[in-house]
Image: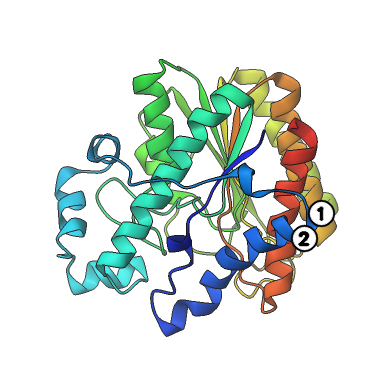
């Protein structure tokens, strides 16, 4: 059975300015339940991530500053969020959602997080609406607690996974692949193991060809024991921040390529949602819901 992390704190509005971006976390599970893709028993409620798992990736000093709400004004601005107890708690629930999903995927083949994909967080600071890095934490847990030695992180959000790339820069056991908009945030890119910067306006045909070619290149070099998939839907042509021109159909095919690759190779898979900023919430929710439909169909 597909297991999906979700708890009400994921919907915390943070501030009036963040109410719209957070709405998808409330509507997405409702949509999946309404259409019958998922039932209540598919969902699990994550608890707090442990300090041990947090500090396996993030510096003790940084974790302590967040716990004590002691970020400097500049550090807080860079995260994009007004710092609060509720925000820090929310992030810790999300981190455990992805780590626990990783446990489920090892047993059942695949699992998902309604939130997560916080790829801009570095070991010692947050950026771009990311305080902690859930894929990095879960990948390190696999290395430390399950003895895995070849992990692939596929990041197809329109923004480069700069924090993830920096965290695993010297770690050969984790391969980072980011395919993102060339002229988009972050201004200063890090070096992933494979970066594919895309020109503005790229459409379905070129996008999907590039993805398939890149995955083929990676899998000729590596034999991953686990895959993480950051499946942001800000690649859509409707996205306010994306600058690409992928359709909903193209976005679905993207998901099918990644998910089928993992399933056919017998590689456990965890998906986290990442970004999506189309002006109509229905477009965001529909694109994200499609990822869940694809995973449910391919694996279960």
- Residue drawn 67% across the image and 79% down it: 279
Which secondary structure lies at badge 2? loop
- Residue drawn 42% across the image and 58% down it: 188
Compared to 256, does 141 lie above or below?
above
Whole-percent x and y of residue 61? 14, 49
Q: Nearer the viewer, residue 157 or 187?
A: 157
Whole-percent x and y of residue 298? 78, 34
Q: Quadrant of residue 299?
A: top right
Whole-percent x and y of residue 227? 58, 31
Compared to 130, does 164 lie above or below?
above
Separation of residues labelled 1 and 2 (CA atoms): 6 Å
Name the residue carrying label 2.
246
Is residue 59 at least partly visible in the picture?
Answer: yes
- Residue drawn 59% across the image and 37% down it: 111
* Label 1 with label 2: CB-CB less than 8 Å: yes
Q: Nearer the viewer, residue 46 or 273?
A: 46
Quarter holding the C terminus is top right
Whole-percent x and y of residue 13? 44, 74
Compared to 115, does 69 lie above or below?
below
Quarter holding the N terminus is top right
Which secondary structure lies at badge 1? helix
Name the residue carrying label 1.
250
Q: Residues within 10 Å of mark 1 (few under 14, many from 20)?
A: some
């Amino acid at each position: 059975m597909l297991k999906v992390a979700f708890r009400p704190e994921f919907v915390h509005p943070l501030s009036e300015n963040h109410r719209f971006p957070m709405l998808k976390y409330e509507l997405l599970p409702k949509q999946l339940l309404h259409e019958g893709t998922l039932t209540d028993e598919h969902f699990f409620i994550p608890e707090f991530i442990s300090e041990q798992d947090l500090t396996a990736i993030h510096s003790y000093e940084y974790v302590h500053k967040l716990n004590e709400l002691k970020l400097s004004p500049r550090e807080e601005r860079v995260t994009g969020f007004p710092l609060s107890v509720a925000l820090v708690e929310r992030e810790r629930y999300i981190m455990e959602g992805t780590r626990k999903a990783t446990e489920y995927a090892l047993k059942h083949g695949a699992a998902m997080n309604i939130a997560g994909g916080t790829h801009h967080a570095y070991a010692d600071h947050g950026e771009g609406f990311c305080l902690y890095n859930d894929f990095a934490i879960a990948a390190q847990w696999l290395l430390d607690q399950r003895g895995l030695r070849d992990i692939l992180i596929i990041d197809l959000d329109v923004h480069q996974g700069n924090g993830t790339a920096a965290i695993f820069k010297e770690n050969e056991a984790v391969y980072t692949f980011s395919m993102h908009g060339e002229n988009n945030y972050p201004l200063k890119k890090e070096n992933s193991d494979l970066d594919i910067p895309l020109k503005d306006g790229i459409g379905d045909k070129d996008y999907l060809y590039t993805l398939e070619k890149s995955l083929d290149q990676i899998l000729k070099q590596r034999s991953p024991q686990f895959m993480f998939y950051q499946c942001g839907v800000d690649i859509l042509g409707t996205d306010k921040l994306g600058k690409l021109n992928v359709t909903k159909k193209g976005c679905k095919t993207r998901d099918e390529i990644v998910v089928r690759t993992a399933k056919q190779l017998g590689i456990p898979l965890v998906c986290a949602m990442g970004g999506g900023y189309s002006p109509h919430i229905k477009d965001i929710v529909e694109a994200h819901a499609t990822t869940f439909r694809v995973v449910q169909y391919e694996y279960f």
